[in-house]
Image (spheres, rainbow, N blue to C red):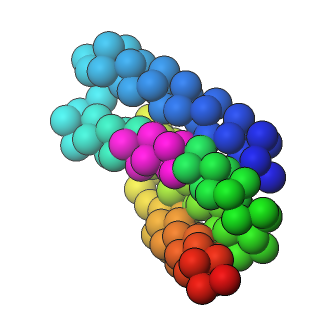
Amino acid sequence: MFPKYFIIGAVNAVLAIALGAFGAHGLEEKLSEHYLEVFETGVRYHMYSALGLMLIALLDKMVDGSRKVQIGGRLIFLGTIIFSGSLYVLSLTEFSKLGMITPIGGLAMLVGWGFVIAGAKKQVKK
């Protein structure tokens, strides 16, 4: 998991920075203040998750491939795609019904972090 998820995290950090710059400079005149804030929320959580994935990859290397840590990383990555992705599309299209799936991504991220915590705790006890 280590190199793959570290790279996935780093690529997502690059994407979050690029999307953040796009939002700040390319969308400022095109979106209402509300939808610009929605876009920025997507960028913020995208970056948090990108950094988290890199840290999870490091943790996984330290604990010799904990299954719970790996599941957590996958859930966080999936949750980020659903959460931030839905906010990006919502803000650009103003299709408000899309906001109904955003919490699913948030829940996946929360559950993912729960798995990471459980995997780390298990390793601490060893």
The image shows residue 70 at horizontal and vertical percentages of 73, 65
User: How many dots with numbers?
Assistant: 0
Q: Which residues, given as a range, are shown in magenta?
A: 44-53
Rendered-image quadrant of the C terminus: bottom right
Q: Is residue 120 positioned above or below 79 on the image?
A: below
Q: Is residue 100 magenta?
A: no
Q: Position of residue 68 (x, y in %)?
A: 71, 76
Image coordinates of residue 95 in percent, x first then y, are: 46, 50
Q: Is there any visible trace of residue 79 in the rendered image?
A: yes
Residue at 37% x, 43% y is: 44
Residue found at the very far top of the displayed protein: 25
Q: Nearer the viewer, residue 22 or 74?
A: 74
Work out which residue is located at the far left of the displayed protein and give it: 33
Q: Is residue 32 left or right of residue 113?
A: left
Residue placed at 50% from the left, 43% from the top?
51
Give the camera-side residue of 77 and 94: 77
x and y percentages locating residue 89 in the rendered image:
51, 42
Between residue 124 and residue 114, name the one nearer to us.
124
Determine if residue 118 is in view.
no
